Image: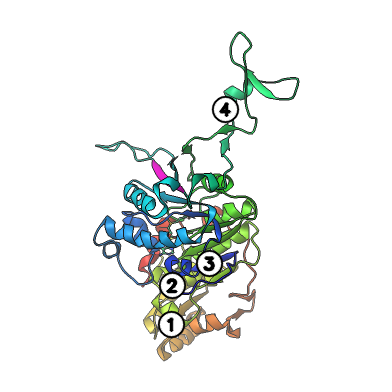
Amino acid sequence: MTPVSYLETGVIYCDDNLHRLSEFPAECIDLIYLDPPFFSNRHYEVIWGDEAEVRSFEDRWEGGVHVYVSWMRERMIEMHRILKPTGTVYLHCDWHASHYLKVMMDDIFGAKAFLNELIWHYETASGAPKKWLHRNHDTIFRYAKQKADLVTWNHPRSPWPESTLKKWQTDEDGRVYRVQNKYDKRYYIDPAGKLDDDVWNITLSSRTKERLGYPTQKPELLLEKIITASSNAGDIVLDPFAGCGTALVAAQRLKRQWVGIDISPTAVGLMRERMERVGALGIKLVGMPVTEEELHTLRPFEFQNWIIQRLHGTHSPRKSGDMGIDGYSFMEHLPIQVKQSEHVGRNVVDNFETAVERDGRQKGYIVAFSFTRNAHEEVARVKESKGVEIELVRVADLLAEKAELVTPESGRLFEEAPLPGPRPADSRPSAEELIGNDDSE
Ligand SMILES: C[S@@+](CC[C@H](N)C(=O)[O-])C[C@H]1O[C@@H](n2cnc3c(N)ncnc32)[C@H](O)[C@@H]1O
């Protein structure tokens, strides 16, 4: 790929970041935060996928940690190239591969460019592991592009503890101090907060509104601290493994420019929604599947998520006995079934009709690439005999936003329907529900 000379911001790329990074101009980014798939997080890999083709986790890292490190190395070489001389990179990892990645980073950036090994300590897990201590931290390596003294740096601070605040006094010049001992030795403190060290205690509680159900989601506070520390307003922040977009959200709030990349269309869809909710305007998505051929190649759960997102629908909470209801339509909340296949036939219509009735509805949608004549006949029969209306929606019509998709009650059902406002947190699919969607076929 030939690098372009100008970098557009406010863009989310749906692609392998290696491919996209190689197109970025040299020295154009102020801050890179990356949170790549961890070396052994099998569960996560299987849920969200991180590759274009269908492969299992085991295939992917066959060959062990060295395969993983060389996969990371080629991407990190690009990141080093595109970082400004004043720029900083934060590499988020955990105990599985952190030591290997540190050696790789020293190799690419030079040991002198190493700035910090940050420990992000999070919520205590319950229960007692048999033979080891709870593994309750991640490691974040912080590197300068070249030399430490060039980097942008606003030392992060945390609020003083209550105990300190209680002892505050203000002197005749308005400076804050506390009395150190009985001889009235004044100890001056900065009211802006206590200087942070390299261990950060931050929790993404399961109860916070912030939680989206995206596995591996990081807390916004963590990203706000990183972005405030290593960039200024207007600077460009890049997250090449953006997930559900925590770094982009923090960048947007802090008035930085941003660019995100993720290989998963599901992640990109979630990110766009989340960025709109924090007021980002004119977001550009690049590389999302747009043709039937591209949609055919998606992994089943990605395809299903794509369709439901496209309909502005909600995912079906995966309960046993849902009989193949994959989601519900926007506004009317009618059942939707998604099939990543051609020639969907009579049986599918029959089974879905039963599911719709069990759900207490008189109407539902099946989305597929194509339907057989029998399927259409069955739709007519079901309507005639039971009064249940099953609409067969072809992916091609969805892509072309065809007029048949208008519903009498609510106007356009599909893409041009107004974007729904923020959904209540509990209507979002949990990680488990999305995992469940993986076997939709
Ligand atoms: C650990 S998650 C990032 C989570 C993110 N920090 C957040 O708060 O949501 C890693 C992400 O990397 C993406 N990914 C994996 N391989 C990729 C690649 N080659 N190019 C771009 N994205 C990739 C996955 O789809 C996943 O969303």
Mark 2 and mark 3 residues within 8 Å of each other at the beta carbon: no
- Seen from the viewer's position, the closer of residues 277 and 21 is 21
Task: Point out the tag, 4 or 1, that comes first from the N-terminus.
Answer: 4
Residue 204 image position (x, y, % from top left): 49, 45
Amino acid type, residue under disc 4 in the picture: Pro
Residue 174 image position (x, y, % from top left): 74, 25
Q: Which mark is residue 161?
A: 4
Point out the frontmost of discs 1 and 2: 1
Tell me the element at label 4.
loop
Q: Which mark is residue 430?
A: none
Q: Which mark is residue 293?
A: 1
- Whole-number angstrom distance, CA of label 4 to CA of label 1: 58 Å
Tell me the element at label 3.
loop
Residue 129 shown in magenta? no
Q: Does residue 320 appear to the left or right of 233 in the view shown?
A: left
Residue 315 visible in rendering = no
- Whole-number angstrom distance, CA of label 1 to CA of label 3: 31 Å
Residue 282 image position (x, y, % from top left): 65, 67
Q: Is residue 343 above or below residue 363?
A: below
Quadrant (top left/top right/bottom left/bottom right) for the C terminus: bottom left
Point out the frontmost of discs 2 and 3: 3
Q: Which mark is residue 303?
A: 2
Which residue lies under the disc numbered 3? 25
Instruction: Name the magenta segment's main secondary structure.
Output: strand
